[in-house]
Amino acid sequence: MIALPTLGMGCAGIGNLYRPVDDRVAGETVAAALAAGIGYFDVAPHYGFGLGETRLGAALAEHDPQARALISTKVGRLLEPTDSDAAERHGFVDAPPLEPVFDYTYDAVLRSIDASRARLRRERIDLLFAHDLGAMVHGNDAARHMADFLAGGYLALRRLRDAGEVAGIGVGVNEIAVCHVLLDRVELDVILLAGRYTLLEQDAAAALIERCRATGTRLVIGGPYNSGILVEGSRTASHFDYAPPPASVVARVAELERACARFDVPLPAAALQFPLREAAVACVIPGLVGAEQVAATLQYAEWPIPDALWDAVGVPSPHEHAA
């Protein structure tokens, strides 16, 4: 299993999540991340319906021709042509005329990684995740998709790993329950958990973290800002879980802001550093768009945070991250 850096970059933003981003800005973002020493990029076919992978692949071809950066992408959705001309679909703006279609079968996984390799311009994908299994996304279809994955897709992931075509396999999800379901049945090298182990949701993943410690499964934490509110703050119209935040969340964020202000710590710095206090967490991957966000993220990652702040915001003593 490869060693991951503690800080990576999520690439949904350069796939036009919420707002359009031009090719130049997308390329500048990846270039700035590489120059800053960020050498791990997480993407998916779903991000802009191929746009995120295409832009990441183009930028890495120019700025990382020796392919030193680590890449993870995902399977579980195939991209099919669509006639829709809607400006926004599934949260992505001005994306190509393709529609993601769920398919977790053996053949679909192999088709998906081949298409991702072409868009990313790389033969080797370092980590490969099954994307968005579980009831949160699939509702009544969750059991059917899980059956397809266990009987087919997971076997394809194992084949790819055993053949050395990927270094590690796992799942990329926004819910905790499905992680337990999978760990009951299969071996996972990595779980990419987005938005469920954050400064706002400190305790929700406690049981999962204990299991990961026991099994040696590493955690990559996506969405450390809960889709934006922990970086944009309580006074700005932002997102929580990809939607407008409820009043209770806004109120809790305001409390966190006041606590951070007492110690002269930016809220995003506390949010970014929180997951890495846990030893089972290998890496945190905020979504980045623009060189300015890359620079700010490095500042947040290095900002000194006193223990008294963690006490003030209710964070218990950690299983310290092995840096």
Image (spheres, rainbow, N blue to C red):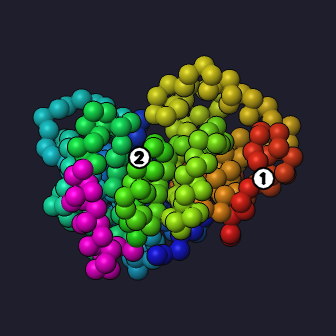
Please tell me whether residue 155 belongs to the stretch shown in magenta: yes
The stretch in magenta equals 147-167
In the image, what residue type sits under mark 2? Val
Between 317 and 287, the residue placed more toward the observer is 317
Of labels 2 and 1, earlier in sequence is 2
When asked about the image quadrant of residue 85, the answer is top left
Between residues 225 and 192, which one lies in front from this camera angle? 192
Disc ID at residue 250: none
- Specify whether residue 244 is painted magenta: no
Across and down, in percent, residue 165 comes to 30, 76
- Give above or below for 67 relative to 136: below
Q: Residue at x 59, y 34 (%)?
A: 229
For residue 203, say whether it is visible. Answer: yes
Label 2 residue SS: helix
How many angstroms separate mark 2 from mark 1 (CA)?
A: 27 Å
Residue at the extreme top? 247
Left or right: 199, with 167 as reference point: right
The furthest residue to the front: 184
Q: Amino acid at mark 1?
A: Ser
| Numbered label attached to residue 178 | 2
**Residue at screen point 66% across, 58% down:** 278
Q: How dense is the environment of label 2, judged by Cα within 10 Å: few (below 14), some, or many (20 and up)? A: some
SS majority, magenta: helix
Q: Looking at the image, which is closer to me, 302 or 154?
A: 154
The reply to whether residue 231 is visible in this rendering is no
Disc 1 target residue: 317
Which class describes the residues within 10 Å of circle 1: few (<14), some (14-19), or many (20+)?
Answer: few
Q: Quadrant of residue 120?
A: bottom left
